[in-house]
Image: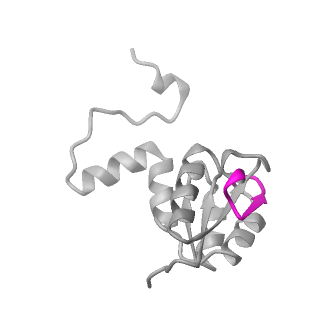
Amino acid sequence: MPVLPGSSIGFLGGGQLGRMSAIAARSLGYGVQVLDPDPNCAASAVADHVVVGAFDDEGAARELAASSAVVTYEIEKIGLLAARAVEARTPLRPSSRVLEVVQDRLTQKRFLEGAGIPVGPYAEASTDDEAVPT
């Protein structure tokens, strides 16, 4: 379903990327909402509304979703449950499954390998001792 100018785009995160994206969205006729723990985040100067909340705050995520036609990420350290709270109410692009994959490097490597995409050498490490090369 297309999101037409006049609609609001929600950003999970309001940093520099969010600010640049918000400026572009506004120039195309979109409203902009951001969720960020800092009410004075970089995107706050150009957003129509800032939902102040932690990146894992499901209630704040639902609030952002309620005022947005679509939501996207500005930062990948969004809590998975917060992303899923958005997704239950409003389209989230990319999906929470993509967030889940990119937040875990082992899951990410396995996903890429499964898709036939070459990855550099790596080893799984579950403890500090396993993470230290011998």
Identify the residue shown where x is 64% and y is 53%. Answer: 13
Vertical side of 4 occupied by 59: above or below:
above
From the viewer's perspective, is 45 left or right of 12? right
Q: Check the image and name the residue furthest to the top.
A: 134
63 and 31: which one is in front? 31
Identify the residue shown where x is 59% and y is 43%. Answer: 16
Please give the count of numbered marks on the rendered protein.
0
Q: Position of residue 61 (x, y in %)?
A: 70, 66
Identify the residue shown where x is 63% and y is 71%. Answer: 86
Quadrant position of residue 122 = top left
The residue segment tinted magenta is 45-55
Vertical side of 37 occupied by 127: above or below:
above
Q: Is residue 107 magenta?
A: no
Q: Position of residue 42 (x, y in %)?
A: 67, 45
Quadrant position of the C terminus in the picture:
top left
Identify the residue shown where x is 58% and y is 74%. Answer: 87
30 and 17: which one is in front? 30
Q: Position of residue 116 (x, y in %)?
A: 20, 53
70 and 48: which one is in front? 48
From the viewer's perspective, is 62 left or right of 117? right
